Image (cartoon, coloured by chain):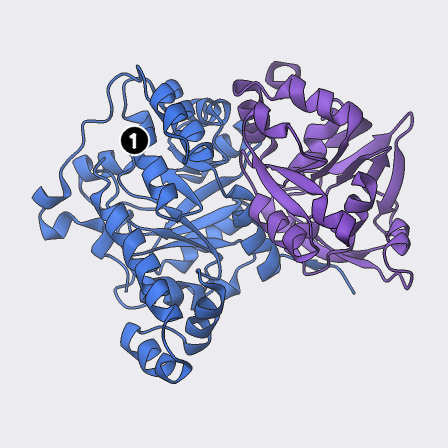
Chain colours: A blue, B purple
Amino acid sequence: MKSQISTFATKKGLAQMLKGGVIMDVVTAEHAIIAEEAGAVAVMALERVPADIRAHGGVARMSDPQMIIEIMESVSIPVMAKARIGHFVEAQILEALEVDYIDESEVLTPADMHHHIDKHAFKTPFVCGCRNLGEALRRIGEGAAMIRTKGEAGTGDVVEAVRHARAVWGAIRRLQNMPPEELMAYAKEIGAPYELVKETRELGRLPVVNFAAGGIATPADAALMMQLGVDGVFVGSGIFKSGDPAKRGEAIVKAVAHYNDPKILAEISRNLGEAMVGRNVSELPEAEQLARRGW
Amino acid sequence: MTKRLKTKIGLLALQGSFREHIAILKKIGAKTVEVRLPEQLEGIDGLIIPGGESTTIGKLAVDFGLLEKLRAFGREKAIWGTCAGAIFLSKDSFQAAHRQQPLLELMDITVERNAFGRQIASFETDVEFPALREISPDETPFHAIFIRAPLIASVAGDAEILSTLPDGRIVAAQQGRLLATVFHPELTGDDRVHRYFLSLVE
């Protein structure tokens, strides 16, 4: 067979190589190096971590390419960057920069209130957020090669990450108990492509790698998400908004590797300094809930 | 097959694609165990170091006291490294002096990380892998998936080349019971490299 560059297998495959790892939000090359040394499997290059996007208000957009390039030059691990939902030109720019993964992210202000990016049209793989199985399978149908449950970014409150992971895994468990004749109606009900519903039922899991995101702030939070069944975690504000980012980053990396070992978790959770301050999701006004973005 | 049922393969499970390896090993009748701590190396016959991020795997191996234990293991028993695992097995991975990542230095190979460029250059292709004839005589090329892949820049000493790209660049090597592939047999349905590794273990 002839060589083929950038197939769905290589796109999905990179996410498979990131499993059991922590992807950290970084805003400078200096942060990126701290993240790599702490054991991050990849970094997400962005101008402001979600907690600062919240504090700042205004329109949040793709980051300055200059800053993304500096981060790409500073580390050897994969570098991801965010495009606005539906903003396929931001995605084209990120592809031209040769970032390793594009996150079509609700953390930025959406550019299209009805349509996500046609991700099949790109050579660069995409990760997208979801709150439930239907949303995950719609994104995969559009070409996403990796899924992250959304959680509620920039809060340091893990409650939404748990809700979304349970929603996805719970739906998959129900799906596996369904007789075949019910699948079409179920696909219609959750607004997901029928073929992907069938595939998910056969696999007993999403057809692509599934990380958790949004509100993970401690090693225990990270291990909780892993025990709930996700393949790895994104940590945004939780590391560089804490008292000792290098130490906390390292501890979260260890917690994801040893998520099933409470003794090790107890050891690595000691003396990490201040966690990010955090905001209770239940106190956030609806308009400030980022997870609601995306359709 | 009865013998194989007793073969226990450890998967270095600090990070990466270890579950994919486990699925294939189970299919071909080997027992598997996840290894995250030094004591978990006891009683296993061979070890696979999966694909993943070599910097992460190396760091966690150091932090949890695995480095010397893995070196000792590899001097006696079979180890197979895929991609990040191949880097970890090597003597040298051309890192800048100030960013030296921990390596097991078990195989006399030098490995160049991200040799094909960034993710956008990741690819699949068929490679010749003559040693697989021992596993299935009607050897056909192996369909190999390369993801931000390294290359084996050179082999020395007792290390031998097992597979190359059509242009001669080295993508698999073996030294005694140590095996390195820079592509990912764990991502394909083809279990021949896994069976070849089991033949090195037994």
Taking A48 as reference, is B27 left or right?
right
Mark 1 is surrounded, within 10 Å at the Cα level, by few (under 14), some (14 to 19) or many (20 or more) other residues, namely many
Residue A110, located in which quarter of the rendered image? bottom left
Identified by mark 1, the residue type is Gly
The C terminus of chain A, quarter of image: bottom left
Q: Position of residue A77 (x, y in %)?
A: 55, 34
A158 versus A76 height, above or below: below
Image mark 1: chain: A
Q: Position of residue A246 (x, y in %)?
A: 40, 20
Camera sees residue A43: no
Return the residue nearer the eye: B83 or A258: A258
Taking A147 as reference, is A218 left or right?
left
Q: Residue at x 83, y 49 (%)?
A: B165
Camera sees residue A183: yes
Q: Position of residue A176 (x, y in %)?
A: 40, 69
Circle 1 sits on which residue?
Answer: A238
Return the residue nearer the eye: A187 or A129: A187
Taking B86 as reference, is B138 left or right?
right
For the image, the number of numbered tags is: 1
The N terminus of chain A, quarter of image: bottom right
A287 versus A113 height, above or below: above
Q: Position of residue A15 (x, y in %)?
A: 52, 48
Return the residue nearer the eye: A207 or A224: A224
